[in-house]
Image (spheres, rainbow, N blue to C red):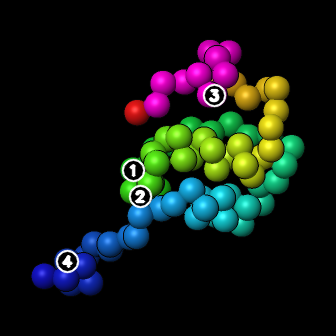
Amino acid sequence: MTAATSGTTKRDPVTRSRLVQDLRALGLAPGTCVLVHCSLSRIGLVIGGTRALIDALLEVLGPSDADDAGPFRRPVRALPLA
């Protein structure tokens, strides 16, 4: 049974560079303020996992002293990575 006949689709693994491309296509740019809450499984297989997503966001948005985890007030870079 193929993906086409089973009703499922097989997606290629998502790379950091693809994340950067997609985030920019969504209109994110340096200095944009965003709050991110996501399920990596909904993106697909992300090569590099959480770290790749965080690095892609930082590349697109640029450095900021305000990088934190909302009410937790912990820097994003200090969050435990799965």
Pointer 1 residue: 41
Circle nearer the N terminus (3, 4): 4
Real-space Cα separation, disc 2 to disc 4, in angstroms: 18 Å
Main SS of the magenta part reads loop
How many angstroms separate mark 3 from mark 4 (CA)? 39 Å
* Amino acid at pointer 2: Gly
- Select label 3 or label 4 by which is in front: 3
User: Of marks 1 and 4, which one's residue comes earlier in the chain?
Assistant: 4
Q: Which amino acid does label 1 sit on?
A: Ser
Task: Please give the residue where the numbered disc 2 appears in the rendered image.
Answer: 44
Q: How crowded is mark 3: few (under 14 residues within 10 Å), some or many (20 or more)?
A: some
Q: Residue at x 39, y 56 (%)?
A: 45
Q: Would you call the spot at circle 4 few (<14 residues within 10 Å), some (14-19), or many (20 or more)?
A: few
Q: Give the range drawn in magenta.
A: 72-81
Q: Quadrant of the C terminus?
A: top left
Residue 1 visible, this orientation: yes
